[in-house]
Image (spheres, rainbow, N blue to C red):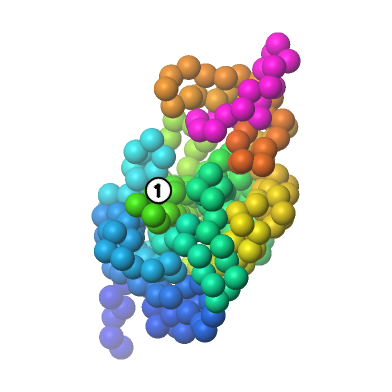
Amino acid sequence: MASSPYADLDRPPLAARALQRALVVPGGLWRRIDVIAETGSTNADVAGAARDGSGEGLVVVAEQQVAGRGRRDRQWVSPPRAGLTLSVLLRPGAAVPERGWAPAPQRAWGWLPLLAGVALMEAVQRITELDAGLKWPNDLVVSDPEGAPGKAAGILAEVAEDAVVVGIGLNVTTRAAELPPTTGLPATSLQLAGAKAADRDPLLRALLRGFERWYAGWRETGGDAELCGLLGAYRRGCVTIGREVRVLLPGGGEIAGVATTVDGDGQLMVRTADGAERRVSAGDVLHVR
């Protein structure tokens, strides 16, 4: 019997042709699914494709990413076939007459990483049966069998000229020794959290189908997160709402208080000790308790 080229038999490769057949359909959002063995950063790859004129609907999935970036230029590196590392190309500012989509205003584009978070949360809940939630703005949080929460995924959106690139990194079968050190919520994986299933193929299919469904609704309403139901879905899944938090702001300084809600622009509302409501558009959130 021929030996397997893969040392980890619980980490099989993705079936690129099967994914293409299942996800690239007439009238659908996804136009091409590229599965590559290794890359530095899928976001960089897709941003380059956007600058070269690639149309909306390109998906690049890497079996291994060696120089990925999270928010604030943090490193996101994935062992071979241990997770889902992918980026998608969107052109929300372009009209799509055949689908009746007018250009979405640029002020609404900030909802795209939160939209990706909702699609990812729903896919993980359905496939793994884990109780997944979102730490604002778009970190996927799952709890281990003892109830301790951990970050299993991160999302980074970047504007590349008139396109938006949304990158997703999800730890699926990553082992404890393979997880990077963190300064906030500890990293974890779906398998470590006790997932009923940790097969990347159905996870990827569910994620991209959910993303397409939410994106279509968002475009049909002109980027109105409340009208398409995205705001409500995000609020229901956001584990930050109602928590005491510290928000470390990008320019330095911090805000402390209780996270009361997420507004129509996707910003976090925090009530400070003096009763003032502060609106946060960017920052690192720490759950105090």
Which quadrant, please, contains the N terminus?
Answer: bottom left
* Residue 74 in view (yes/no): yes
Give x and y (percent) for residue 260. Answer: 72, 30
Say whether residue 271 is magenta: yes
Residue at the image point whose x is 43% and y is 75% from the top: 31
Residue at the image point whose x is 61% and y is 41% from the top: 266
Residue at the image point whose x is 56% and y is 41% from the top: 137
Residue at the image point whose x is 38% and y is 35% from the top: 72
Give x and y (percent) for residue 132. Answer: 64, 51
- Which quadrant of the figure has residue 181? top left
**Bounds of the magenta segment:** 269-287
Which residue is at the front of the view, 29 or 287? 29
**In this rendering, is residue 266 above or below 87?**
above
Regarding mark 1 in the picture, which secondary structure is present there?
strand
Give x and y (percent) for residue 84. Answer: 44, 61
Taking the image as shown, residue 167 lies to the left or right of residue 257, namely left
Which residue has dot 1 on it?
Answer: 158
Which quadrant, please, contains the C terminus?
Answer: top right
Taking the image as shown, residue 216 lies to the left or right of residue 261, namely left
Number of numbered discs overlaid on the protein picture: 1
Instruction: Give the amino acid at mark 1.
Output: Glu
- Which quadrant of the figure has residue 90? bottom left
Say whether residue 83 is magenta: no
* Residue 65 in view (yes/no): no
Give x and y (percent) for residue 249. Answer: 48, 24
